[in-house]
């Protein structure tokens, strides 16, 4: 493993040329992004993180406003083409100040509930970022009073832009985590002895110093110290003093004093005074390895204890699951509505059949009732017709009856004419003069006068007088009185 430090140095053209002939190989790389800088570690086939690889670094600026990252896309495409690979698998580590790592004590909840709680309250634990924060966690230990969890966060804008750039360059994004968490995973893979006792890892990079305090391999404290110098080799005493001050502060405030301190990316400080019992060393596996290289290698093969961010792939999967759940809920709602409608329609059909059966039972009685009603209406129509005829009958019908009773037996009428106020009678009688008093005695006659002279005629029955009488009718008189009342009947 002593050759690992050399293996992660930037290879020359000859070394890269040998790897560039692996046409058709699917490349596996780790990418660490910091403000303006990208570090790519190409892992040779069959090797895991912590076992070395070729390192590529390039300034890439910042993502564009539309979410693209052309410089990073071009950089990743060149790395893939140099390796002669058609496609690649990429794991992303986001370094500070873009990515963060903390150890938090959370309520004793399930992991899904903890993830939702941290995601909703991310800005309570981490500095805010443009576009929001993506978070992830791993439960380190749990108890009734709370859960100790390693929590990572990164700015969504940079993560999504890096994922888009990697996808455009021909890579499939596998993992996304923070730089400190990935670096810790790779350091433990390079030097498993770091899991013994209390060990503090001091990892230096261009963005600053990461102090990761372990207790039997479990992360207990994670601190970030902004770099006092971008080149630790040029100011070794400055970086060493900052590290010693951070360890003393951790001891005084958190009660944590490591048994040993392993440094990477910087010189081993000379402990003095109260830290005489702490062993400071630089293991061969970590010599010359910067925080950026450790983060890129560790992102490619994270340990189970490495918390991963809910990256673009995970968020897409989450959105797909939510869409499936929504579609399933809509389908279930449609099924319930259809079942409800079918049941209601069935009930309506049943009620309709019952109504039809009841109508069939009632039909004979209703038919009889309708027939009786028709008969009643016909009888009423006839009665009304008779009543109308009786009301509209001429009054001369009654007059004829009266006249027939008033005329003597030797008299008969040959014609009569009834006007509104007069009745004209033509006929024969033995004595026309005898008829005048008969009609004058009638109550319904106002006056009687001869309409023409009386003529005598010889008939088979003897001599008869032809007469013509005009009777002036009494207004409002009783035209229906019989001859008994008029006295005509006695004659």
Image (tube, rainbow, N blue to C red):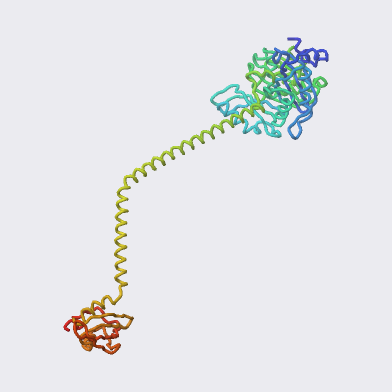
Residue at 71 percent across and 18 percent down: it is 28
Q: Is residue 127 visible?
A: yes
Q: Which residue is the extreme one toward the top?
A: 2
Q: Which residue is the extreme one toward the left?
A: 490
x and y percent of residue 469 in the render?
A: 28, 86
Q: Is residue 247 visible?
A: no
Decide which of 43, 461 is in the foreground and name it.
461
x and y percent of residue 352 in the render?
A: 39, 43
Residue 342 sits above or below residue 152 on the image: below
Quarter of the image holding residue 318? Answer: top right
Left of 215 or right of it: where is 280?
right
Decide which of 407, 138 is in the foreground and name it.
407
Residue 305 sits above or below residue 473 on the image: above
Residue at 66 percent across and 23 percent down: it is 221
x and y percent of residue 205 in the render?
A: 76, 22
Decide which of 419, 263 is in the foreground and name it.
419
Which quadrant of the figure contains the C terminus? bottom left
Residue 204 sits above or below residue 491 on the image: above
Residue at 77 percent across and 30 percent down: it is 62
| Count of residue discs | 0
Quarter of the image holding residue 14? Answer: top right
Which quadrant of the figure contains the N terminus? top right
x and y percent of residue 467 in the render?
A: 26, 86
């Amino acid at each position: 493993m002593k050759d690992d430090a050399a293996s992660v140095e930037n290879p020359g053209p000859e070394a890269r040329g040998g790897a560039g002939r692996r046409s058709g190989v699917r490349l596996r790389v780790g990418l660490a992004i910091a403000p303006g800088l990208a570090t790519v570690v190409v892992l040779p086939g069959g090797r895991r993180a912590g076992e070395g690889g070729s390192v590529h670094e390039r300034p890439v600026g910042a993502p564009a406003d539309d979410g693209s990252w052309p410089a990073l896309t071009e950089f990743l495409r060149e790395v893939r083409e140099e390796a002669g690979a058609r496609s690649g698998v990429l794991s992303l580590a986001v370094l500070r100040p873009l990515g963060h790592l903390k150890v938090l004590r959370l309520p004793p909840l399930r992991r899904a509930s903890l993830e939702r709680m941290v995601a909703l309250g991310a800005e309570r634990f981490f500095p805010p970022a443009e576009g929001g924060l993506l978070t992830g966690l791993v439960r380190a230990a749990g108890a009734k009073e709370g859960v100790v969890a390693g929590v990572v966060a990164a700015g969504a804008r940079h993560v999504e832009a890096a994922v888009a750039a990697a996808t455009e360059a021909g890579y499939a994004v596998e993992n996304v985590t923070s730089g400190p968490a990935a670096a810790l995973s790779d350091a433990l893979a390079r030097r498993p002895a770091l899991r013994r006792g209390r060990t503090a890892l001091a990892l230096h990079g261009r963005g600053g110093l990461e102090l990761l305090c372990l207790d039997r391999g479990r992360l207990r404290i994670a601190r970030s110290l902004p770099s006092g110098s971008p080149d630790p080799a040029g100011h070794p005493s400055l970086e060493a003093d900052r590290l010693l001050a951070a360890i003393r502060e951790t001891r005084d405030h958190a009660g944590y004093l490591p048994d040993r301190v392993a440094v990477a990316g910087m010189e081993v400080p000379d402990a003095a005074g109260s830290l005489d019992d702490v062993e400071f060393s630089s293991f061969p596996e970590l010599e010359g390895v910067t925080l950026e290289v450790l983060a890129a290698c560790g992102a490619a093969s994270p340990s189970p204890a490495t918390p991963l961010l809910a990256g673009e792939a995970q968020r897409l999967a989450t959105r797909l699951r939510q869409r499936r759940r929504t579609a399933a809920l809509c389908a279930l709602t449609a099924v319930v509505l259809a079942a409800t409608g079918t049941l209601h329609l069935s009930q309506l059909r049943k009620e309709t059949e019952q109504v039809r059966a009841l109508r069939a039972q009632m039909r004979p009685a209703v038919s009889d009732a309708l027939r009786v009603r028709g008969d009643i209406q016909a009888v009423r129509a006839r009665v009304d017709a008779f009543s109308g005829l009786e009301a509209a009958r001429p009054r001369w019908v009654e007059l004829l009856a009266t006249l027939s009773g008033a005329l003597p037996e030797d008299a008969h009428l040959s014609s009569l004419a009834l006007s509104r106020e007069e009745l004209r009678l033509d006929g024969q009688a033995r004595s026309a003069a005898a008829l005048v008093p008969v009609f004058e005695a009638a109550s319904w006659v106002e006056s009687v006068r001869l309409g023409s002279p009386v003529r005598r005629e010889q008939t088979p029955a003897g001599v008869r007088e032809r007469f013509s009488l005009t009777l002036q009718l009494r207004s409002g008189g009783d035209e229906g009185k019989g001859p008994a009342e008029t006295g005509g009947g006695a004659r």
